[in-house]
Image (spheres, helix red, strand yellow):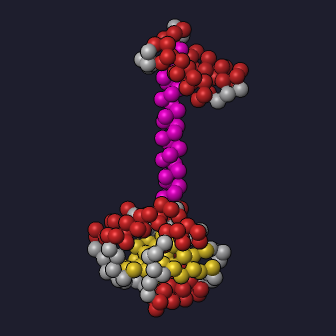
Amino acid sequence: MAGLRIAVIDDNPVRGAVLEAGLREAGLEDIHILSGRARLLARLVALEPDVVLIDIENPSRDVLDEMFLVSRAVAKPIAMFVDQSDASMIEAAIDAGVSAYVVDGLRKERVKPILDLAISRFNFHARLSAELEAAKTALAERKLIDRAKGILMRQRGIDEPAAYALLRASAMKQGRKIAEIEQALITADELLTGGGGE
């Protein structure tokens, strides 16, 4: 954790100093305070932080929209400290990619636990997203396999296990992935049958 690069977005020098003190007490040294909204996104992207801490007394919808752009551009954990909020602002912050949203909690002793929380939640959501993407890919591949098997069963009058065995054997013989064979078979069938497919 000591090697983390932290970007602190804060227009209030006093509040920024509180965040910096909390980070330094947690053993973090690579801390960059960014103030002002001019070219904020470009400055953050150039900095390549591991974590972004944002301190805003009263976030507006415009600020949250900007944080949405920040979260997409840096794809890193983001913690936001605010003085006042309501349920809709909290929801908008989470939708914007904020990992930890802290209301009326800017005290230096709370910075490290909140930083840890933001990192943990970000990593948890990143794992979930990766698992979801893997499941979608597997489902799409499964549909291709079923479609290719259906084409072979129809064209050759064979059963499902024989169709799958034929796909595997063809992939091995050609040194290609089975997905490539399936896609080629489906494309050829669509060309020959006028796009009907299975």
Q: Position of residue 175 (x, y in %)?
A: 71, 26
For the image shown, how many numbered marks are present on the structure? Answer: 0
Q: Is residue 3 left or right of residue 72?
A: right
Residue 21 seen by the camera: yes
Q: Is residue 15 above or below residue 124?
A: below
Seen at 44% across and 63% down, the residue is: 69
Q: Residue furthest top?
A: 157
Q: Is residue 39 above or below residue 17?
A: above
Q: Is residue 96 left or right of residue 169?
A: left
Residue 73 on the magenta span: no
Q: Is residue 196 left or right of residue 184?
A: left
The N terminus sits in image quarter? bottom right
Quarter of the image for residue 180 reads top right
The C terminus sits in image quarter? top left
The range drawn in magenta is 125-152
Residue 137 on the magenta span: yes
Q: Position of residue 176 (x, y in %)?
A: 67, 28
Seen at 59% across and 87% down, the residue is: 25
Q: Is residue 81 above or below residue 187?
A: below
Seen at 54% across and 18% down, the residue is: 188
Q: Is residue 49 left or right of residue 87?
A: right
Q: Position of residue 128 (x, y in %)?
A: 49, 53
Q: Position of residue 179 (x, y in %)?
A: 59, 29
Q: Main secondary structure of the magenta part?
A: helix
Q: Residue furthest front?
A: 38
Seen at 55% across and 26% down, the residue is: 183
Residue 120 seen by the camera: no
- Report the front residue among 104 and 30: 30
